[in-house]
Image: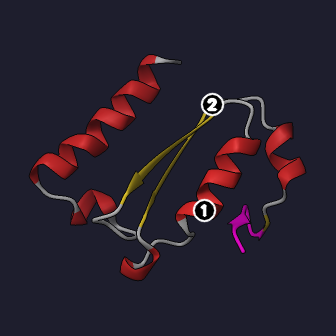
């Protein structure tokens, strides 16, 4: 289950969001809070949702990713921000 603002996230919640959302997720085996499959479902329900998955990171991807992988994280954030 995924929590958003302390309550379960439901598909109808995503349709209500009117702002852009960048969902960054990693590998649950490394500590990511949700699976890639659930992340895809959440991003698909958001009107302006984007998803970036980092298999070499868990919850603290900004700390865990190194070199090229960290560059991918920064690139994903920059691409998202350019679209605003």
Most foreground residue, 15 or 55: 55
Badge 1: how crowded within 10 Å, few (<14), some, or many (20+)?
A: few
Residue 58: percent from the left, percent from the top? 37, 70
- Marking on residue 6: none
Rendered position, 20 above or below 27: above
Q: Cα distance, mark 1 to mark 2?
A: 20 Å
In reply to whether residue 42 is colored magenta, the answer given is: no
Residue 54: percent from the left, percent from the top? 35, 57
Residue 65: percent from the left, percent from the top? 21, 59
Tell me, yes or no, whether the two marked residues, 1 and 2, touch with CB atoms within 8 Å: no
Instruction: Give the residues drawn in magenta, as a range.
Output: 1-7
Rendered position, 84 above or below 66: above
In reply to whether residue 5 is colored magenta, the answer given is: yes
Label 1 sits on residue:
37
Badge 2: how crowded within 10 Å, few (<14), some, or many (20+)?
A: some
Most foreground residue, 19 or 66: 66
Q: Tell me the SS state at disc 2.
A: loop
Q: Tell me the SS state at disc 1.
A: helix
Determine the residue positioned at 64% across, 62% down: 38
Rendered position, 46 above or below 38: above
Determine the residue positioned at 69% across, 69% down: 2
Among the two numbered marks 1 and 2 on one chain, the one whose residue lies closer to the N terminus: 2
Q: Give the quadrant of residue 45.
A: top right
| Left or right: 11 as drawn, with respect to 1 | right
Label 2 sits on residue:
20
Determine the residue positioned at 42% across, 18% down: 82
């Amino acid at each position: 289950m995924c929590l958003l603002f302390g309550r379960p996230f439901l598909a109808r919640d995503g349709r209500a969001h009117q702002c852009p959302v960048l969902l960054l997720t990693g590998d649950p085996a490394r500590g990511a809070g949700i699976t890639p499959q659930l992340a895809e479902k959440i991003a698909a329900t958001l009107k302006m949702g984007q998803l970036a998955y980092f298999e070499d990171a868990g919850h603290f991807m900004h700390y865990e990713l190194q070199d090229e992988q960290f560059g991918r994280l920064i690139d994903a954030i920059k691409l998202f921000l350019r679209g605003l």
